[in-house]
Image: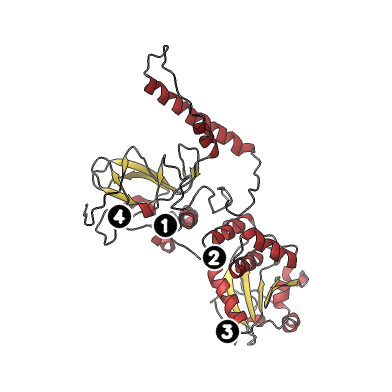
Amino acid sequence: MAKQVAEVEIHAIDSLKNDADDLDISVDLIDDGLFLGNLACARDHKTLEKLKITHILTLDLVPLPRTVLDRHTFTFKFVKLADIPKEDLITQLPTCNEFIKEAITNGGTVLVHCYFGVSRSAAIVIGYIMEKYSLCYEDAFVLVKSKRRFIGPNVGFVAQLKLFGHMGYQLNRDDPRFKQFRLKMAGQKLKQVKILPQLFADLVKPDPGLVRERPDPIVYRCKKCRRIVAGQSNIIPHIPKQVKIELAKKGMRPPPSTLTGLTCAENGQLLIDKLKSLACQIIEEKDCGVTVHDDGPSQVLDGYNEENMVDACITRADAVEACRLMWFVEPMAWMPDVTRAPSGKLHCPKCNNKIGSFSWLMGCKCPCGQKVAPAFYLVPSKVEWSNIVQNVQVTL
């Protein structure tokens, strides 16, 4: 029997006439030893023999029929993947790329296919080309499209491929952008089952306030009791909204008021609050009818929306342009409600003082105007930053 890489339970029924029988065979050579095609090609034995296919990578909701899988001349890999923007493509890229590389290295020929050979399989092939030739998404897309003109990965896959390139063609679990992507995936599952699935249990990080052999050099502490509630590695930095940056660049200064009787500082605070409110209104109006322009190079990821699991606002941990008005963090063990509630308050585990909030689904809008979702945030007025680390600290 053919070597089967992935265990499956449901197979396409080839004894019944279905839509796949009406598909014309479509396949194109993309790179040395790599073909991209549709389901009809994968099911046609004569075509597979003609192309000297030895390995078949299937991206679909069901694997190939038993009549195909039972052919001992092929090695199969099946990845269950729907063609929707919310689907998790990026975590499949390393194993799929390895499958393709190993096959070609050993002298084999690979067919990568989905149903039409347009979105899912094209995304996998683009990811492979990106890694092989160290290309950004745009360049890899142009290369593949020059070989197969009607490819078109959905917007969610495009954003994930760009993120894959940003991380050096590997899954960097310490990258804040990948952390936020997985948090978004977990939020979708929590919405369905009302509890955080075990698959995402690793997203809840250890309590940084307990004993640690290698504590972070920079920590965030409750201002009331000085209990450590986060380390620098727990921060998920974001870029402020451009409208807020432009308002700040104007350097507006409030004059002393003869009408309100307030001091210059008090009057200034009122103006700042009004600017924040105005900025939010401008952002909301733009979000309703703004035209999105392509910024060219793939340094910009697709922005947040309900169909896209990659946030454009999340940036690298060392980014100098990161906003400091609110600290967004990853969920931690001292937050007991985050695994069983969609939203709630965050209290210091020592003094029980409220220091922030969380929301898996709705997220939170920072004072800078940027929305982050899911959001686990600490309020700067309740939490202080410190670079003084106590190597041994036990807080109960």
The answer to whether the residue labelled 1 contacts the one labelled 4, judged by CB atoms less than 8 Å apart, is no
Above or below, comparing residue 7 to residue 122 in the picture: below
Above or below, comparing residue 124 to residue 204 in the picture: below
Disc marking residue 169: 2
Residue 283, image x and y in percent? 56, 36
Residue 12, image x and y in percent? 65, 74
Q: Nearer the viewer, mark 2 or mark 1?
A: 2
Q: Nearer the viewer, mark 4 or mark 2?
A: 2
Crowd band around label 3 with a 10 angstrom C-alpha radius: few (<14), some (14–19), many (20+): some
Residue closer to the observer: 267 or 10: 267
The answer to whether the residue labelled 2 contacts the one labelled 1, judged by CB atoms less than 8 Å apart, is no
User: Residue, x 32% and y 39% (percent of image)?
Assistant: 382
Whichever of labels 3 and 4 marks the residue nearer the N terminus, that label is 3
Cα separation, mark 3 vs mark 1, equals 35 Å
Q: Nearer the viewer, mark 3 or mark 4?
A: 4
Whichever of labels 1 and 4 marks the residue nearer the N terminus, that label is 1
The answer to whether the residue labelled 4 contacts the one labelled 2, judged by CB atoms less than 8 Å apart, is no
User: Residue, x 62% and y 60% (percent of image)?
Assistant: 137
The amino acid beneath tag 1 is Leu
Residue closer to the observer: 250 or 342: 250
Whichever of labels 3 and 1 marks the residue nearer the N terminus, that label is 3
Residue placed under numbered mark 3 in the picture: 3
What secondary structure is marked by label 1?
loop
Q: Nearer the viewer, mark 3 or mark 1?
A: 3
Cα separation, mark 2 vs mark 1, equals 28 Å
Residue placed under numbered mark 4 in the picture: 208
Above or below, comparing residue 227 to residue 213 in the picture: above
Disc marking residue 383: none
Residue 7, image x and y in percent? 53, 77
User: Residue, x 54% and y 67% (percent of image)?
Assistant: 92
User: Residue, x 72% and y 63% (percent of image)?
Assistant: 145
Crowd band around label 4 with a 10 angstrom C-alpha radius: few (<14), some (14–19), many (20+): many
